[in-house]
Image: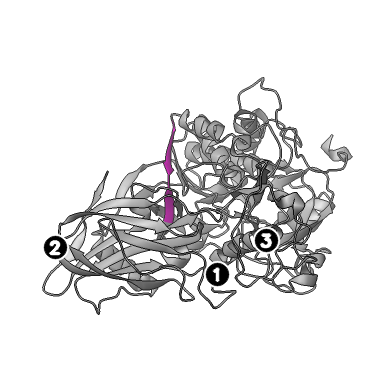
Amino acid sequence: MSMISLWASGVGATELFVEAESFDIKGGWVVDQQFMDIMGSPYLMAHGMGMPVANASVQVVFPKTGTYYAHVRTFNWTSPWKKAEGPGKFKLAVGGKLLPVVLGDKGSEWMWQEAGKVNVNKREITLTLHDLTGFNGRCDAIYFTTRPEDVPPSDIKELDAFRRKLLALPDVPETAGRYDLVVVGGGIAGISAAVAAARLGCRVALINDRPVLGGNNSSEIRVHLGGRIETGPYKELGGLQKEFGHTRGGNAKPAEFYEDEKKADIVANEENITCFANYHVMSVEMEGQIIRAVMAKHIENGTEKRFVAPLFADCTGDGSVGYLAGANYRMGREGRDEFGEMTAPEQADKMTMGASVQWYSTDEGKPVGFPFFNYGVEFNDNSCEKVRMGEWTWETGMNYDQIRDFERIRDYGLMVIYSNWSYLKNNFRENEPYRNLKLKWVAYISGKRESRRLMGDYILKEDDIRKHVAHEDGTAATTWSIDLHYPDPKNTEYFPGAEFKSIAKHINIYPYPVPYRCLYSRNVNNLFMAGRNISVTHVALGTTRVMRTTGMLGEVVGMAATLCKQHNELPRGIYQRHLDKLKILMREGVGKKGLPNNQLFNQGGTLANPPQMK
């Protein structure tokens, strides 16, 4: 067992500060880092789907014995919908003694809650988190002080400074090494960019803020791959996915369907890639319009590293690196007149496609109970969803900011699942089909579709795709329909303004090569992007966002980064002076030759190829 012994002691209070995510025994608690940029830190969450989870614990060393006052930073997560005691209840034990205060069920924002007074008779002691409900209680940090009036700050910037002081974090992070390319984001696009660049001779750092690679296609989120490979002018693009793509379709399936080990192996087996799992990029160093370095923090132990490179690829989905670097970006829907898009709304607005918290149940062959759960979303026999699982159609947050409001968006996804399931199990008059069902899996990492889109030298729009406008720098072909999501009108009937179900409207397309100019920033000169954050309108995103497509675009970025290294260029220079060389690389591909196309599921609907594509 590791031991935490960081403290401050002086003329005033004697203090001990413990980050919950650093607990070495997590028990059934999970580390949630999705909202670090909003609330300041990762945290531990008791994600038990209504069943209390196993204890989390850590051994700490107090600066001295004596009487301490304990404060816990926590959040009553259902408070946006019901001003009452919440379900995320837990307690803190110090040295095996359970403190009497119930935590996590009060207030309406992240707050420091008094946990009680503790007599510390020996300096080495174990802290334990006891979950009481299994309903997503959350603990960010624990603070002990010998002065009862001391409470840590709530302001995010002040709290960050407070953390850094008490945890003795260095002012300058250690350098993680120098690389030819730093790829941030370990989803399908990021994996593809890193592997393509590595196989062509670049030294690559791949930074991923989860322990598992794959992003939306990982076992943590469970969205299957969409789109086609072996299509368009460069049929070798997408060959990497024959190596690491999963071979069974389906959303919200058991974890093994998503074959996480393939993604881990392809990265681990590339000698030119160093993978930094569990690191979240927090800041960037700029020199004019050039990124010199990115700084990342480990989501469990707080270690900070500095990554230096001449080139960076933002594959975060949220465009996080671009945002930190001051890249031009868009968010929401463009108005119809701006780009002449017939599918766009008349007026621009902030609406985006939403995020999905997927789930499924299993038949246990005998009655299975579920706690009553009612925290502000009311169901009845007509409005309840009479289903055994929920996949992409369970979608929240379309009318909220997918960055600033993302914790609320994810939490609403959890709340409607629990509320609906509780109703089916406990209130629904015809609940015979649900009596033997157990809520088996609920994602706590939410699958996003849309947030920031970083602007490049070209913005792909609806007319390009529908009229098949030819561009000399066309790369990987997008094949998915223009697939845009909207609140489900039936769901709106019952939950106006608080929808949690969506519908999709599809416009079929011909395979369309995405211009290379959409894959680098127009104002941050050494920044590539691949994934759902490339330079497209909201409407065009409807086709480019699926993961086989984003993976192919990641390959193109890896190839372009290699040419940048070879010719001492920035991304724009490849378009201006070396496009012919990029076309050669795209034609050759970087995947292993002779592998069968095992990526034939969920290809999406397309029309026959037009004459110019034959």
Residue stretch in magenta: 272-281
Kind of residue sitting beneath label 1: Thr
Q: Decide which of tag 2 and tag 1 comes sooner along the chain.
A: 2
Please name which of the two marks, 3 or 1, marks the residue nearer to the observer: 3
- Marks 3 and 2, how far apart in space? 50 Å
- The circle on residue 196 is none
Q: Decide which of tag 3 and tag 2 comes sooner along the chain.
A: 2
Q: Are marks 3 and 2 in contact (CB under 8 Å)?
A: no
Q: In what quadrant of the picture does the C terminus appear?
A: top right
Vertical side of 379 occupied by 45: above or below: above
Check if residue 257 falls in the magenta segment.
Answer: no
Q: Which residue is mark 3?
A: 426
Disc 2 residue crowd, few under 14, some 14–19, many 20+, Cα 10 Å: some
Name which residue lies at 61% across and 28% down: 243
Q: Are marks 3 and 1 in contact (CB under 8 Å)?
A: no
Q: In what element is the residue under mark 1?
A: loop
Q: State whether residue 327 appears in this view.
A: yes
- Marks 2 and 1, how far apart in space? 38 Å
